[in-house]
């Protein structure tokens, strides 16, 4: 973790002339963007996978007619079809999973008072007066001062992105059901499909309870995802 802390400090030093006291916050946003750039090829592959799965819908509809109400046989046949065409029904999960280590690193980095036996100097950094190690639930509980306004701004941004993602995901999943019932492709995926549109609002809870540094990562990443998906899945 000390290596990661040094990386954040170096990025903050580079950005300090431009962002002054908020340089560390800007460094976290830049770090998040770099992570998303590294993961972008996988996101493009996931988009291709979704188009490939959509192309299989007519054949899946034929399998559904063939197997009727035998769900076990249908699910087995669908999985075999995906394997035959080299299409993974869960390929879209990989970009998100690969970002988790970076999020947890930031979480632990700004939740620790010491790093390598020394005081964690990163906790001295802030964003417009809001400590990067602070949490929204604690700050807002003490009133709506300058730090509180920072969190309110983040909540507004997250709510806007979550609503955009919710509406778009609901349209996409509804279209999948109309075009062939994609929710039945793999066991249990139907339930996941119903819940997925609402997961975007979970970000509001995350931003409220994690350190501000980790919240910045979440806000930047989810905003990137919303824009990226709008471009790749248009």
Image: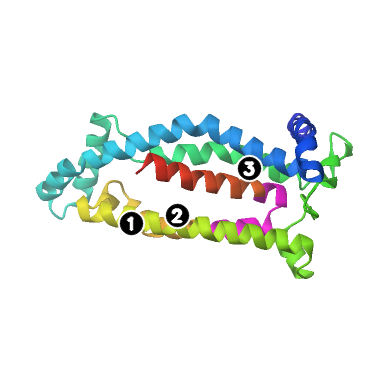
Other residues around mark 2 within 10 Å, as few (<14) / some (14–19) / many (≥20): many
Point out the stretch of residues depicted in magenta: 202-215
State which quadrant residue 53 falls in.
top left
For label 1, the residue is 171
Callout 3: 10 Å neighbours few (<14), some, many (20+)?
A: some
The residue that disc 2 covers is 165
Between circles 3 and 2, the one closer to the viewer is 2
**What residue do we see at 15% from left, 55% from top?**
69
Q: Which residue is mark 3?
A: 103
The single residue placed furthest to the front in the displayed view is 18
Camera-near label (1 vs 3) is: 1
In terms of secondary structure, where does tag 2 sit? helix
Can you say which quadrant of the picture contains the N terminus?
top right
Question: Magenta includes 133?
Answer: no
Residue nearer the viewer, 67 or 197:
197
User: Marks 3/2: CA distance?
Assistant: 20 Å
**Residue 97 point in image, percent of width and height:** 52, 40
């Amino acid at each position: 973790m000390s290596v990661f802390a040094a990386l954040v400090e170096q990025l903050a030093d580079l950005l300090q002339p431009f962002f002054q006291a908020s340089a560390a916050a800007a460094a976290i946003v830049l770090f998040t963007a770099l992570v998303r750039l590294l993961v972008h090829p996988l996101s493009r592959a996931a988009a291709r996978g979704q188009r490939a799965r959509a192309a299989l819908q007519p054949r899946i509809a034929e399998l559904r007619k063939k197997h009727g109400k035998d769900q076990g046989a249908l699910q087995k046949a669908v999985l075999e079809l995906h394997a035959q065409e080299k299409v993974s029904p869960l390929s879209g999960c990989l970009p998100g999973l690969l970002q988790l280590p970076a999020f947890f690193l930031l979480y632990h980095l700004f939740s620790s008072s010491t790093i390598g036996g020394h005081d964690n100097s990163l906790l001295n950094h802030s964003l417009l007066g809001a400590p990067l190690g602070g949490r929204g639930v604690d700050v807002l509980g003490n009133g709506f001062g300058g730090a509180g306004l920072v969190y309110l701004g983040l909540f507004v941004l997250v709510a806007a992105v979550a609503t955009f993602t919710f509406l778009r995901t609901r349209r996409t999943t509804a279209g999948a059901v109309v075009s062939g019932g994609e929710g039945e492709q793999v066991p249990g995926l139907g339930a996941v499909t119903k819940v997925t549109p609402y997961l975007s609002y979970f970000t509001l809870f995350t931003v409220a309870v994690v350190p501000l540094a980790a919240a910045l990562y979440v806000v930047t990443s989810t905003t990137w995802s919303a824009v990226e998906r709008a471009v790749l899945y248009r």
